[in-house]
Amino acid sequence: MLTGWLDVDRTFSLMDDFRRRMDRVLEDMEAGQPWQAARSNTWPRANLYDTGEDLRLVLQLPGVSKDSLSISSNQETLTIRGERKTEIPRGYSIHRQERSPVEFSRSFTFPVKVDADKSSAELKNGLLTITLPKLPELKPRSIEVSVG
Amino acid sequence: MASTEVMRKEQNLPQSMRGRPVVMPLVDIFENDDEYMINTDLPGISADNLNVSLDRGELTVEGICPDEPDTSEALVREYRPRDYRRTFLVPDTIQADGISANLDDGVLTIRIPKAAAVKPRRIEIKVD
């Protein structure tokens, strides 16, 4: 009887796993952009937005504290390194463990030149948002048309 | 042992909320003599947009992800804002009013204390 229940549980957990993989595949298909193709094991996941004035890079970093994060940049690339720990609390037994510890490093190059000195970063609710101002000569400019 | 049966998750299929797919967040579930502990990844969800509820033995975590600002254009998109939802079956032998939830760095930690009746108890031996 008891083993029967456990088998049922295992079947469902396989389904869970399958569901998660499918979610990832679908996300990858949706992402479908030719920048750095997101692989299913890419961690953390990142979105890049253009707000006109700035480029904004947002990374999903649940469980990464400010102290375990480092951001460095040179002229061409921005590199984010960090570590996410998922420790088993002492004296506890495990029912499920789906979250995994990760040590990561991701580098990004941008389609336009950005001003690294004036960049800012904010970590909130597991999202890291890095705002990179575009260099002045690249900001959108309207050109007046004079009538002769 | 009863603990092998607890916390078996109810199969909640993704439903469309606000026309957006709902995904199951990843969880770790731990147990010791005093409590159950659930850790779950909810990146981008603030405490205001998070709802944890217990109803007839089902503990539900729901997180609504805010929309992306319209003003910016996405150049690269590796993820989309997703709403999260996951339900857990909780045994009767818990103290419902003692449940606590704490959100830190995008990780929600829920602690569910066990009822005193099911905690292991040490019995003192008196020597006359």
Image (spheres, rainbow, N blue to C red):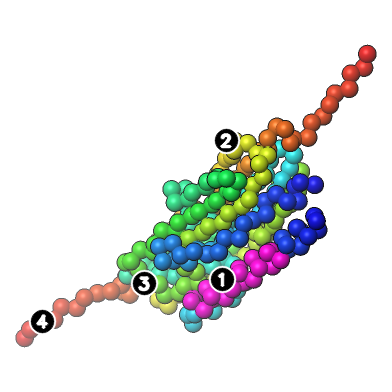
* Residue identified by numbered label 4: A146
What is the CA distance from the residue labelled 2 to the residue labelled 1? 35 Å
Q: Quadrant of residue B101?
A: top right
Point out the frontmost of discs 2 and 1: 2
Q: Badge 1 sits on which subunit?
A: A
Q: Is residue B121 above or below residue A132?
A: above
Which label belongs to residue A95?
none
Would you say the residues marked 2 and 1 are in contact, meaning their CB atoms lie under 8 Å apart?
no
Q: Is residue A18 magenta?
A: yes
Q: Which residues are magenta?
A: A11-31
Q: Nearer the viewer, residue A4 or A9?
A: A4
What is the CA distance from the residue labelled 3 to the residue labelled 4? 31 Å
Q: Badge 2 sits on which subunit?
A: B
Count residues near mark 1 (Cα–Cα under 10 Å), then give few for <14, some for 14-19, many for 20+. some
Magenta segment's dominant SS is helix
Q: Are marks 3 and 1 on the same chain?
A: no
* Residue identified by numbered label 3: B73
Instruction: Point out the image quarter for the C terminus of chain B.
Output: top right
* Residue identified by numbered label 1: A23
Q: Amino acid at mark 2?
A: Asp
Examine the rendering and report whether any part of residue A58 can be seen.
Answer: no
Q: Is residue A113 magenta?
A: no
Residue at 41% x, 66% y is B19
Q: Secondary structure at mark 3?
A: strand
**Left or right, residue A142 beside residue A71:** left
Residue at 36% x, 72% y is B73
Examine the rendering and report whether any part of residue B19 can be seen.
Answer: yes
What is the CA distance from the residue labelled 4 to the residue labelled 1? 54 Å
Q: Amino acid at mark 4?
A: Ser
What is the CA distance from the residue labelled 2 to the residue labelled 3? 45 Å
Which label belongs to residue B97?
2
What is the CA distance from the residue labelled 2 to the residue labelled 4? 73 Å
